[in-house]
Amino acid sequence: IAHFQPKHLAGKHVLLTAGPTFEAIDPVRGITNLSSGRMGFAIARAARAAGAAVTLVCGPVALPTPAGITRINVVSALEMHAKVMECLHAQGADVFIGVAAVADYRPATPAEHKIKKEDGAPPPIELVRNPDILAEVAALPNPPLCVGFAAESQKLAEYAERKRRSKKIPLIVGNLIQEGFGGDNNAVTLFDETGATALPPGSKAELAHTLIERIAKLLEKPEKP
Ligand code: PMT
């Protein structure tokens, strides 16, 4: 039996990122992380259930595409950045949610051929910064409502709030890495200008619905004079 879903986001376009990125070192190796994509996919599903048109830009994950959403697969942070910007230019968005665990750095020059094991010192890997997709979207002249995520191993409140301020976004969702990465459940705290609100721990699907309701309320808020 389908649950009744209020269509809070009817007529809205929600763009989101999910999963890890993979930054090539050579044709077979790379730098990545343990994001499964589950949190982002749950939010995509919840946004769709709330009536939104949903575009999901996701890194390499092994998850089926939720019904009714547009999925764009990418590998690296640079590709994720390009697809997000392309989508914003083509269609715009009312909401942007950065759920992806984007690599902060990438190897400066991936080797064209497989790196061979040599005697002597291991080869150095020079890293360069990736673009910050969320901060860039939030800094656009007419930005969508931007929501971030912060996965931390300690000092969640301090680090999440710091990220919210530095990226100049109204809302960030904090989770501890041992609770957020992989798995079907999570425990999250929402940080906005009014402070911190811990949500009851639950499945990623339940938390996604609560978050989407919260975002719908933020969209309804009249503009500040
Ligand atoms: O995929 P799952 O296994 O379900 O796990 C979910 C999750 C733990 C990955 C997710 O809930 C989560 O917390 N995602 C954000 C991970 C993180 O620590 O992000 P960050 O602190 O590197 O970045 C902060 C915010 O900026 C995020 O919204 C991120 O998407 C965004 N960002 C970061 C770097 C970058 N170059 N571009 C970005 O857009």
Image (cartoon, grey):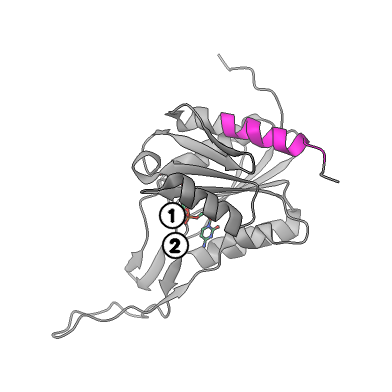
Asked if labels 1 and 2 touch by Cβ distance under 8 angstroms, the answer is yes
Residue 53 shows up from this direction: yes
Is ligand 1 closer than 8 angstroms to the Cβ of mark 1? yes
Is residue 205 positioned above or below 90 on the image? Answer: above
Q: Does the magenta segment cover residue 214?
A: yes
Question: Which circle marks residue 155 in the picture?
Answer: none
Of the residues under marks 2 and 1, which one precedes in the sequence? 1
Q: Residue at x 66, y 30 (%)?
A: 50
Question: Which circle marks residue 20 in the picture?
Answer: 1
- In front of the other: 23 or 172: 172
- In front of the other: 117 or 203: 203
Residue 127 point in image, percent of width and height: 40, 76
Q: Residue at x 41, y 67 (%)?
A: 23
Q: Residue at x 57, y 29 (%)?
A: 209
Identify the magenta region.
210-222
Residue 19 point in image, percent of width and height: 46, 50
Helix, strand or loop status at disc 1:
loop
Task: Rate crowding at label 1 as few (under 14), some (14 to 19) or many (20 or more) other CA atoms within 10 Å.
Answer: many
The residue labelled by disc 2 is 103
Residue 208 point in image, percent of width and height: 54, 33
- In front of the other: 6 or 116: 6
Residue 65 shows up from this direction: no
- In front of the other: 69 or 51: 51
